[in-house]
Image (spheres, coloured by chain):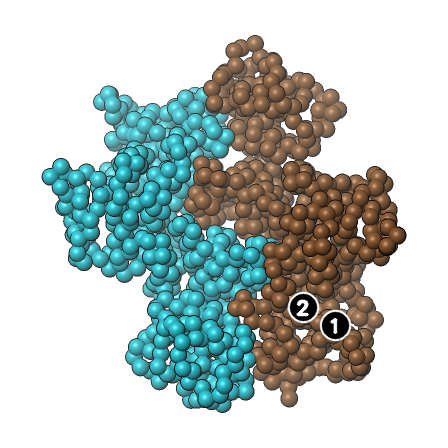
Chain colours: A cyan, B brown
């Protein structure tokens, strides 16, 4: 008999590590202990199960070829012993023994090991709120809970309150909407998806959720839950009034499940996860850990981060499988790459947000780049707004955020590789990515973004963020906000500012003299292509303080002034479609 | 007045270079000469215009904000002089003068320059075929020709023959199908998309085209075209019989338009394009060239390649715009990244095909990896077949091909960056790309491919290509072809081979003794996941020659045997859904 490998946790990392170890070592004696009934299920699929898009939860426990991943499968195919409904209670690090209990029978079991893997995953944060134990209040923790939520929705719960607007809350909002629910999301922070997006990108998501009839309340704190005399939840009590509720989902985040590891004396990090080295070894040399219970190293900052993801777990499983069986595979760390679907919007991010980059002292350059995610003339081309964060010092990309109906995941993936490889912005802009009109413009959104960021670093482009312009308007600063779009566009909607000027782009070369050279002139258009062009025209004409509004009005996160107004220029305005 | 920049060609590189130069140098005197009427139109959009998906050809000449890119626009916004309908006839390199003629008036013009840009593009290859001048025979060369083809289709031409099954032919097939045409494609080579795909991937496209009612004739040479007494084409004459035709599109490739450059004595390369250095400078220091008229350097091989693309042109324009105005921007070269939509299939490639890699002496490892492009349990998940080509010596990826209804472009883009950055396969497999069930499995298709290639290089996985197995069957080699799927799968369809064995995966550990240890045992399943597992089980049990069929039957390019057959094992076959 070969080396004894014991794995605590049978959902994601555990089975993957077991399978990989088995392939590399046919003689190893491999045992998985899983406290629940189900093994190796796809936790990320539960929102789609609740939505009813996945009919049967057993689909979440099959391979692509429809093979059940049950204990018999692991035994016959992988030659892995699986003990389900078996809760590990204690690790004797010196004696190299895991002590466990069968949760049904109470039987006590001991599992000696040569190598141990801790894959205990995460658990949802349960805030200490009055009424949290009322019927109809759920914390999405496992498949059993998902089945319970789905049963409630099938029984006709209508008013759903989601506490927390992070990405589990978002995916669940779509799931509840598919069930015909009226949804209210309550978020303590002043924006949705605070761990993922900067404020002005989050606003785009909030506007879209409003259009999808989801009520979003940010900056609101939940103070408790109240119920009827049957013990069933009826209202969510907040500092902004009560919200009626037939079902409440608490989705305020997850935390690493480290009870067992901590009790065994393994090092726990400041993000709350088990500390592992690059080989995913814990502070005890014979014990590995991976997946949602560990901290990862951020590829850019080197800092420990807690960002649990199903894809990371899968990769951890592979690395651990190697290293359990004599390998020395290193896990390179993470960028926090994330994608999620919110109705028909794609929302993603990788690397550092502007906020995170500034906190870490980078000399930050940002750009907002909205544009069609396919060739603009391709029928049904969809908008995608990108925000890039770059480091002025090295000229490299630090982070990317994407929001919109256009395809986002490929821009996130391409950026993730570019960031990890420290590619200069100019190289990203010239990378040979593929192109055809159904997939992107000849200049892909990411190429455009990289180009703009590089132009900003070299000084060719000078942009102002929407937040900066908003502040300048609010504080009554002396500057000119210049709309360079067509008259028809200007009349339809524009940024509200009393000192607003309107000169269509094609008249700007001859009419630049109407503008003051000593003041900052902020040109804007729909997406910032014409705004940038206007800025270059003005710079060429000696306007040293010319700049443009980043992202144009498409990315403007504040209200726009709509309807006709009197144009402030004396000349007859150009009436065509140009500008 | 600043330096005089003259640009020959106003479709893609020219306007981009002009705009970039203008932004960097407000004083430059910039002139574009364009022989056609239209400037800066999106040539890649013409198939969608012919299909009628784009209603008005003017949409191809607008910016995303709906701005017409006409001569007045260039003059007023970019301060660029545009002479359309102006054909450059001669470059006096010593005197630095371009001589041109107005194609309408015959007026002769001279344009002195300090810096010249040649962006004369490509032209379709017109084979010398009898009957090529018949009415109804088209070579898609420019927007005017596209308008003519669309008019003919609107007039009700029904039987369309496309000569050439390269990517223009493919995009046009979809366009003609959208017009209700009956389509036949004739290709001289023995596969479709010969410049893009290896044979077994091309076969997947051919099967799909057949399902879409497009007749594909490969290995067939066109000998001429014959017409009626009105001079209108009626038939395409081939070595495989005549094909009736109401309209014929010749799409046998494009070649660089270098007449002007060659006459001026500039170096022309062995691929027929203008030779340029990394700064896109020709053999004459004051003359730059870019876009479809130049050769590019292949990032991996360093060889000159001719692979015209709209996205490359755009990037060339930017690089030239920099270098015209004092910059020293280098263009890094290409990988030939390509994507195209064929009805609802996505077909793409980047880097070297297996054929190209072998020709260049690489120690090639390949893998076929079919699988759902989204989480397999996600409703409507679509298949994507990837083929990877790797270099055993360096452990890096050389090329990727993708075919299927699943999302291909993001895998191509991610691979393109990984190839250009020479990322080891193990690093690609652990890259932090984003994941959620609507976008990929927890283990993305590309991650799975990179892992398999790495497993093959380390010897953990031993695969055989479908072509190798086909040859072994045909030559009656003494080996065992072992189906490890479920009984139901086996009964539905299987590879035809008289010595076929069937043992479901979950019975393999106990029944391995039924197989001969001295022979090669080739395990197969649907996608090769179970085949790989079977191979590891057999290796563990001492079957030194165990291997698996790459890509499973999903990627098997030959006919399958269907319907019930007698199972050759004596034991009662397992009846469940497992395996």
In the image, residue A70 sits, relative to residue A385, either above or below, namely above
Image location of residue B516, percent across then percent down? 62, 16
In the image, residue B513 sits, relative to residue B427, either above or below, namely above
Q: Residue at x 41, y 72 (%)?
A: A493
Asked if residue A334 can be seen in this view, the reply is: no
Image location of residue B463, percent across then percent down? 61, 32
Which chain is indicated by disc 1? B
Image disc number at residue A183? none
Q: Earlier in the sequence, mark 2 or mark 1?
A: 2
Q: Residue at x 53, y 21 (%)?
A: B488
Task: Between residue A150 and residue A132, name the one nearer to us.
Answer: A150
Relative side of B162 to B59, left or right: right
In the picture as drawn, the residue positioned furthest to the top comes out as B570
Spatial separation of the CA atoms under disc 2 and disc 1: 10 Å
Q: Residue at x 73, y 68 (%)?
A: B120
Tag 1 secondary structure: loop
Image location of residue A13, percent across then percent down? 39, 37
Residue under numbered circle 1: B35
Asked if residue A477 can be seen in this view, the reply is: yes
Q: Which image quadrant is residue A134 in? A: top left
- Where is the N terminus of chain B found, in terms of image quarters? bottom right
Task: Between residue B455 and residue B141, name the one nearer to us.
Answer: B141
Residue under numbered circle 2: B11
Kindly check if marks 2 and 1 are in contact, taking CB atoms under 8 A apart as contact.
no
Q: Which image quadrant is residue A426 in? A: bottom right
């Amino acid at each position: 008999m070969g080396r004894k490998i014991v794995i605590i946790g049978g959902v994601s990392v555990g089975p993957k590590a077991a399978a990989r170890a088995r392939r590399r070592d046919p003689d190893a004696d491999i045992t998985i202990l899983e406290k629940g009934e189900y093994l190796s299920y796809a936790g990320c699929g539960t929102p789609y199960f609740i939505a009813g898009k996945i009919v049967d939860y057993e689909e979440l426990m099959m391979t692509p070829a429809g093979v059940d991943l049950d204990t018999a499968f692991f035994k016959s195919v992988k030659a892995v012993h699986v003990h389900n409904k078996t809760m590990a209670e204690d690790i004797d690090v010196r004696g190299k023994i895991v002590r466990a209990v069968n949760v049904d029978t109470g039987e006590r079991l001991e599992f000696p090991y040569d190598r141990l893997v801790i894959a205990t995953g995460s658990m949802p944060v349960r805030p200490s709120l009055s009424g949290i134990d009322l019927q109809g209040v759920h914390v999405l923790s496992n498949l059993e809970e998902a089945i319970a939520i789905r049963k409630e929705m099938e029984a006709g719960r209508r008013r759903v309150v989601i506490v927390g607007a992070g990405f589990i809350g978002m995916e669940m909002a779509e799931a509840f909407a598919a069930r015909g629910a009226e949804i209210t999301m309550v978020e303590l922070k002043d924006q949705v998806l605070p761990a993922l997006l900067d404020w002005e990108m989050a606003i785009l998501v909030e506007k879209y959720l409003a259009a999808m009839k989801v009520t979003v309340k940010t900056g609101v704190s939940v103070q408790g839950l109240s119920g009827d005399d049957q013990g069933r939840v009826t209202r969510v009590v907040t500092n902004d009034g009560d919200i009626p509720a037939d079902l409440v989902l608490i989705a305020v985040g997850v935390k690493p499940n480290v009870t067992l590891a901590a009790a065994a004396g393994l090092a726990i990090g400041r993000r709350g996860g088990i500390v592992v080295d690059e080989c995913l070894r814990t502070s005890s040399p014979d014990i590995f850990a991976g997946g949602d219970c560990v901290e990862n190293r951020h590829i850019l900052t080197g800092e420990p981060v807690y960002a649990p993801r199903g894809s990371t777990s899968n990769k951890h499983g592979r690395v651990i499988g190697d290293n359990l069986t004599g390998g020395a595979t290193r896990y390179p760390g993470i960028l926090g790459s994330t994608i999620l679907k919110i109705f028909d919007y794609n929302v993603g991010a990788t690397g550092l947000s502007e906020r995170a980059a500034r906190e870490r002292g980078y000399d930050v350059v940002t750009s907002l780049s909205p544009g069609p995610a396919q060739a603009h003339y391709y029928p049904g081309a969809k908008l995608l707004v990108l925000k890039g964060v770059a480091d002025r010092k090295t000229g490299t990309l630090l982070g990317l955020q994407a929001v919109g109906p256009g395809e986002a995941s490929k821009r996130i993936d391409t950026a993730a590789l570019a960031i990890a490889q420290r590619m200069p912005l100019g190289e990203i802009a010239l990378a040979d990515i593929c192109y055809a009109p159904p997939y992107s413009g000849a200049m892909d959104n990411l190429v455009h973004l990289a180009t703009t960021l590089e132009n900003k670093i070299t000084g060719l482009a000078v942009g102002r963020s929407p937040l900066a312009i908003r502040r300048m308007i609010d504080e009554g600063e002396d500057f000119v906000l210049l709309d360079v779009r067509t008259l028809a566009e200007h009349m339809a909607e524009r940024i509200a500012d009393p000192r607003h000027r309107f000169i269509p782009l094609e008249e700007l070369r001859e009419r630049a003299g109407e503008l003051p050279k000593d003041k900052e002139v902020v040109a804007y258009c729909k997406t910032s292509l014409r705004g940038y062009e206007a800025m270059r025209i003005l710079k060429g004409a000696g306007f040293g303080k010319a700049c443009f509004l980043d992202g144009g009005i498409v990315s403007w996160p504040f209200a726009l002034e709509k309807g006709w107004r009197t144009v402030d220029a004396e000349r007859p305005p150009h009436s065509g479609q140009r500008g």
